[in-house]
């Protein structure tokens, strides 16, 4: 190395008498150590470090940021990996929706409305002393509650009392929303007084096996004809039990 450096020194000194530009272009090297201070070895030649070289040396940082941008994209792919994780979690339930539960292996906490397994034990879900709808004035409902259908339960039954109106029709809207992943085949939500096929009742599926039921309470010849509304959550399949935490919103409105 020292020998090469000596030779290079001699070349440099020789060049000093000649054109300087030709000299700096011809200095051969293997590494930057073979060059003079202030020079770098590029393509087998010693080149004087210029400001643009210095900024190019900064380029790796720029490259890093450019690469970083690309890595940001792969970060996005990481997000799709997250959705893969979601798929993985449903696969953890043997490929079944999250709500499918083993009645022999799961623990499920009774909700506050138990026992309400059948209509005769139905929970009077709103103020039991109030009849909603028309009495003197129209009394609306806009309430949401939470409960859980457990694998060993037959159903969760609820009821409330409402009055018809003489002068106008109004609406009862139910919205049943499972808070885990389920399907309409696995969990049933029903307004027991009316089927979705009735002309005055409209049903719309929601995500996770949820259902919106909109019912028209038609006007009656007399004011305040009293009725009981029954609605229930139950298992939809005879061979698969589910564990479904859910929310139900009930609205009576004009
Ligand atoms: Ca329950």
Image (spheres, grey):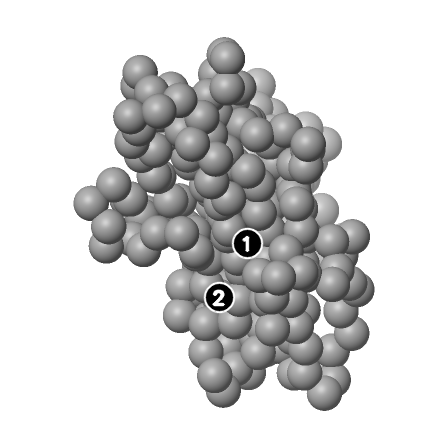
Q: In the image, is the residue at mark 1 within 8 Å of ligand 1 by its beta carbon?
A: no
Q: Which residue is mark 2?
A: 187
**Residue nearest the viewer, comparing 99 with 152:** 152
Extreme left residue here?
199
At 66% from the left and 72% from the top, the residue drawn is 153
Residue 113: percent from the left, percent from the top? 74, 53
Q: Quadrant of residue 98?
A: bottom right
How far apart, in angstroms, are the residues tagged by discs 1 and 2?
9 Å
Q: What secondary structure is found at the residue carrying circle 1? A: strand
At 40% from the left and 70% from the top, the residue drawn is 185
Badge 1 vs badge 2, beta-carbon distance below 8 Å: yes
Q: Which residue is mark 1?
A: 178
At 68% from the left and 37% from the top, the residue drawn is 128
Seen in the image, is 220 located left or right of residue 3?
Answer: left
At 46% from the left and 72% from the top, the residue drawn is 236
Residue 211: percent from the left, percent from the top? 41, 50
Q: How many residues crowd mark 1 within 10 Å: few (<14), some (14–19), many (20+)?
A: many
**Residue nearest the viewer, comparing 204 with 23:** 204
Between circles 1 and 2, the one closer to the viewer is 2
Q: Is residue 127 visible?
A: yes
Q: How many residues crowd mark 2 within 10 Å: few (<14), some (14–19), many (20+)?
A: many
Vertical side of 168 occupied by 163: above or below: below
């Amino acid at each position: 190395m020292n020998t090469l450096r000596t030779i290079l020194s001699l070349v440099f000194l020789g060049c000093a008498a000649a054109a300087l530009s030709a000299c700096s272009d011809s200095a051969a090297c293997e590494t930057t150590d073979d060059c003079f201070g202030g020079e770098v070895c590029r393509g087998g030649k010693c080149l004087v470090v210029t400001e643009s070289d210095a900024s190019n040396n900064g380029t790796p940082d720029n490259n890093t940021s450019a690469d970083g941008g690309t890595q940001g994209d792969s970060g996005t792919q990481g997000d799709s990996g997250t959705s893969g994780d979601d798929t993985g979690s449903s696969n953890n339930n043997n490929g079944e929706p999250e709500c499918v539960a083993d009645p022999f292996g799961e623990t499920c906490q009774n909700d506050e409305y138990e026992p309400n397994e059948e209509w005769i034990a139905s929970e009077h879900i709103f103020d039991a002393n109030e009849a909603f709808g028309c009495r003197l004035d129209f009394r609306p409902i806009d309430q949401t509650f939470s409960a859980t259908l457990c694998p060993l339960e037959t159903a969760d039954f609820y009821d409330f009392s409402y009055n018809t109106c003489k002068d106008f029709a109004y609406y009862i809207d139910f919205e049943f929303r499972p808070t885990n992943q389920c399907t309409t085949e696995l969990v049933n939500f029903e307004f027991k007084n009316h089927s979705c096929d009735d002309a005055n009742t409209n049903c719309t599926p929601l995500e996770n096996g949820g259902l919106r039921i909109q019912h028209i309470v038609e006007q009656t010849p007399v004011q305040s004809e009293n009725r009981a509304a029954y609605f229930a959550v139950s298992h939809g399949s005879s061979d698969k039990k589910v564990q479904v935490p859910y929310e139900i919103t009930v609205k009576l409105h004009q």
